[in-house]
Amino acid sequence: MSKSMGFMLLKNSRRWLAKEPEGWSWGDPRTLNLDMIWQEVHRFEMPSGMDISFHGGGIIVFHFQPNSKTMPNNEELDEQLRALSERVKYMNAFCFCLHASCLEKEELGLETTSPTKRDIFIYRGSPTLLSGEAIETLPTNDRKLDKNRPFTGPGYIGKEALDEAGRRLAGLAHSVEAKLLDQAALINQAIHNYQNHNFSSAVTLAWTVCEFIQDQKWVEHLAKSRHRIAGETLSNSKRDRASDINSSKVTGILNAIGIIPDDLKNEIDQVRSNRNNWLHSMKEPGRVDAERAIKTSAKLLENASKDTFPVALMLMSPSLEVN
């Protein structure tokens, strides 16, 4: 498995990365060429040694480190799939970090991309040496640029926002035990489902984040204290399991001891109720429910990471006639 894989950032509202190229004119495809799309315009080096290169036309390539979890240990199918899943997780987490960074640095609400294995390609240093399922949708020759709609739109995402996204990703990746990188990837997938009007999946994914982070905080609290809870001193084996007390009680205790503030507790309780109504009673959540779930999960990620992750959700209005 090649160590370098990438994806095209935005499918519907593409922007240049780092800068707009000289000689390019919006609306005139004759001024667009392949070099503009694929030229490396910026690079971020993570403390782990993994590099992220940014290419003009909205293409992002991750250069993974040998001997890391993103590299397969053998040729077995399950091991290859595990390594691929790890790479896709990094890409999804980065997309969420970039969403937050664009809001913070450029006040730009950015549509979220949620890469899957169908959206990524293996990169060997040139657009003529690509492989993977995504190559059918990528600009690989000037003729293809002429035949398809423009690959970029006006405006660009600046270097400061790209670096800030890399910094956020590095911070999440550093918190290995808390699995914050996994949580950011799930929030990104929840946002993507929201954009596609799949509100039930958005709520389910966001609640997974809410519950996991609370459980982690609960286990950490128990590990640090020998307090009696409900009159019982918990054994070491029980301290290792957050499931000994149900989710609503965990939220209440974390609120009572000051780990979760009152306003966040109220939002968590509402998200839990909406999720349970969906899974246990098939009461499908709506747009407002999904929005609350995503923003609540992002607040919990902020609480756990001590970083900021602002969210601005965008939704395409359906084109339906009203009788």
Image: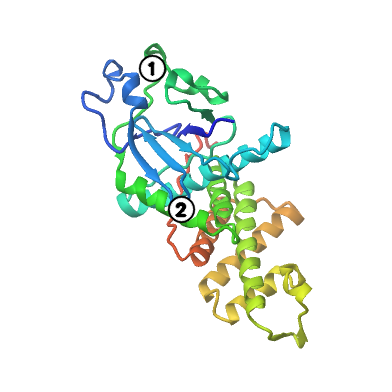
Does dot 2 land on a helix, a strand or a loop? helix
Q: Quadrant of residue 226?
A: bottom right
**Amino acid of disc 1:** Leu
Q: Position of residue 85 (x, y in %)?
A: 62, 40
C-beta proximity under 8 Å, tags 1 and 2: no
10 Å neighbourhood of mark 2: few (<14), some, or many (≥20)?
some
Q: Position of residue 202 (x, y in %)?
A: 59, 49
State whether residue 108 appears in this view.
Answer: no
State whether residue 216 appears in this view.
Answer: yes
The disc placed on residue 11 is none
Residue in view at x 75 percent, y 68 percent: 243
Residue with the mark numbered 2: 170
Q: Distance between the Cα atoms at labels 1 and 2?
A: 34 Å
Q: Is residue 68 above or below residue 80?
A: below
Q: Position of residue 57 (x, y in %)?
A: 36, 29
10 Å neighbourhood of mark 1: few (<14), some, or many (≥20)?
some
Query: 244 or 198, which is in the foreground?
Result: 244
The disc placed on residue 145 is 1
**Amino acid of disc 2:** Ala
Residue in view at x 74 percent, y 85 percent: 230
Specify the farthest residue to the front.
67
Give the colour scheme of this rendering.
rainbow
* Quadrant location, the C terminus: top right
